[in-house]
Image (spheres, grey):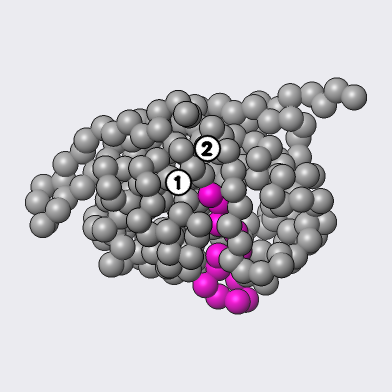
Amino acid sequence: MSTPLLFACESALDNAVPRTEVRAVSPRQFIIAGWTGRDSAAIAHHIHELELLGVPAPSSVPLFYRASASLLTQAPQIETLGEDSSGEAEPLLFRADGEWWLTVTSDHTDRKVETYSVAVSKQMCPKPIAAAAWRWSEVAPYQDELQLRSRIFEGGQWVDYQQGTLSSIRPLASLCADSPLGLGAAEGCFLSCGTLGAIHNAQGVGIRPAAQMEIELRDPRRQRSIVHRYQVQTLPVVA
């Protein structure tokens, strides 16, 4: 069993004053949903930017990749082999105490390995995950308003890397239903729900590595955010 993750879970049932309780959740199953864009043009854009890196187009959309639950980490630093990996912010649903909770994660991926196997690349890097969560049933009615954002430390400053709303991603409940987990998943199931395209830099490069990344899920209706920042330590590739 994986090491338990601690989440500050915020809820406000029946419009009560928000209450936060710490829950320890041991990840038992982890699935990463890919190609989850709601807009066919957005999917085509993401496929294209990955094809520029040599990543083959998916056989169908969406796809659900199995990954080791032990990859999930709340550590402020991860280690990756070589310098060909990069992160991407994703909303993530996990099952605890018989219900779904929403947080934000980074599907940090080895882009070199991704050129020959997306499934293998998903297994190559730790997956940073925030330490706070919201009760899914409370935000599901207005999920399209939730904002997803990431920034990377580049050129000595923080720059926007991804920005948009969950309206660009398929409804998360439908992803749960279509995934191998199902809506009534067991305790400790985690589903990463897809991402947004990268914002190109001045050189026209979209997906790119960075030594630091910040991921954020913002709820403008309730004026709150879940933020997680992590550093990337690259290890030398020894042949």
Tell me the element at label 1: strand
CB-based contact (under 8 Å), mark 2 and mark 1 = yes
Residue at mark 2 to residue at mark 1: CA–CA distance: 8 Å
Which residue appears at 40% of the width and 40% of the height?
188
Q: Is residue 234 above or below residue 183?
A: above
When asked about the image quadrant of residue 210, the answer is: top right
Q: Is residue 203 above or below residue 67?
A: below
- Residue 196 sits in which quadrant? bottom right
Measuring from the top left, give residue 44's x and y in whole percent: 67, 72
Quick check: can you spot residue 201? yes
Please tell me which residue lies in front, 227 or 192.
Answer: 192
For mark 2, does the 10 Å Cα neighbourhood hold few (<14), some (14 to 19), or many (20 or more) residues? many
Q: Which residue is drawn at the image coordinates 53% and 49% (left, top)?
A: 31
Residue type at tag 2: Ala
Residue type, label 1: Phe
Q: Which residue is mark 2?
A: 69
In the rendered image, the residue lying farthest to the bottom is 40
Q: Residue furthest right?
A: 239
Q: Which residues are magenta?
A: 31-42
Residue 53 seen = no
Q: Which residue is mark 1?
A: 190
Q: Secondary structure at mark 2?
A: helix
Residue 134 image offset from top left, x and y in percent: 29, 48
| Figure check: 86 above or below 15 | above
Judged left or right of residue 226, residue 39 is right
